[in-house]
Amino acid sequence: MKNKYLMPSVQITLPVLFGYLAIGIPFGLMVVNAGYPLWVAPVMSAVMYAGAGQYIAVGLFAAGAPLGAIALTELLVNIRHIVYGLSLITKFKNVGKWKPYLVFALTDETYSILTGCNVPDGADAGTFYGTIALLDQTYWVAGTLIGAVAGKLIPFSFSGIDFALTALFAVLLIDQLVKTHDAMPPVTGALAAGAAVLLAHFGVMPSGNILIAALAFGIAALMLVRGRNFGTKTDTEERI
């Protein structure tokens, strides 16, 4: 990676570095505490790379859940990535050989960064985006490895660790608001999530469908407000 790609990418991904170390370390601890070998944590992070999905997978495997149930659960947890991909069709149009990896490495945090940054003058879009995605995954693998090693050497308390992922999302949201000056998407998302929770609370739908319902409400609302340009270059990239 040339310096013109690496240094700007490191600066952009610093929030993810600290966030991924904070939530990757407890994942590594969870893996070894569940009785798996130390190497499982970094290998899983390299080939699966699903964040919350990895946390869930370890718990389900440790509980002896059927493979079919695990696959269905992972699909429902990560189904939001379909929406991510659709909104990045234009942005990924000319990324060349990087496209397969960018699709694989599209986590929540990487998506947030890619939709809120501009390609430096004279830089190749594919290499720039790919460097960002690769750095983010490197941070995650490093965090899980540190946690797995620590879990073998020292005792550790999980108290308060579950808030790390929420804190990371809050930091990324603030960063996007500062860059785009557009509060419509997060406000719409908050209202959609609130509506889905209320529907589940009053028994209108099962509580397991909250995430899917919130995504559907949010997309529908943005489509109504911004029309057919929602998620395209004119709506997203030109504002950043």
Image (cartoon, grey):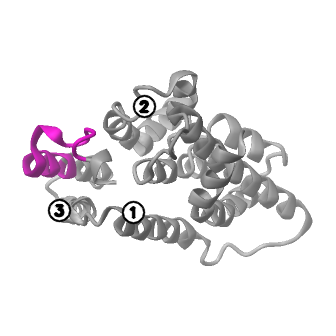
Left/right placement of residue 177 relative to residue 34 reads: left
* Quarter of the figure with the N terminus: top right
Q: What secondary structure is marked by label 3?
A: helix
> CA–CA distance between discs 2 and 3?
32 Å
Q: Nearer the viewer, residue 45 or 117?
A: 117
- Which residue in the rendered view is the most extreme toward the right? 153
The residue at 73%/57% (across/down) is: 143
Question: Which residue in the protein does label 3 denote?
Answer: 195
Dominant secondary structure (helix, strand or loop) of the stretch shown in magenta = helix
Q: What secondary structure is marked by label 2?
A: loop
Question: Which residue in the protein does label 2 denote?
Answer: 92
Query: Hey, what amino acid is under mark 2?
Result: Phe
Q: In this view of the protein, can residue 76 be seen by the observer?
A: yes
Locate residue 98, reporting x and y percent. 57, 27
Query: Hey, what amino acid is under mark 3?
Result: Ala
Mark 1 vs mark 2: which is more N-terminal? 2
Locate residue 59, reporting x and y percent. 61, 51
Q: Is residue 230 magenta?
A: yes
Q: Indicate which disc residue 176 carries.
A: 1
Q: Nearer the viewer, residue 58 or 13?
A: 13
Locate residue 148, reporting x and y percent. 81, 56
Q: Nearer the viewer, mark 1 or mark 3?
A: 1
Read off the magenta span.
217-235
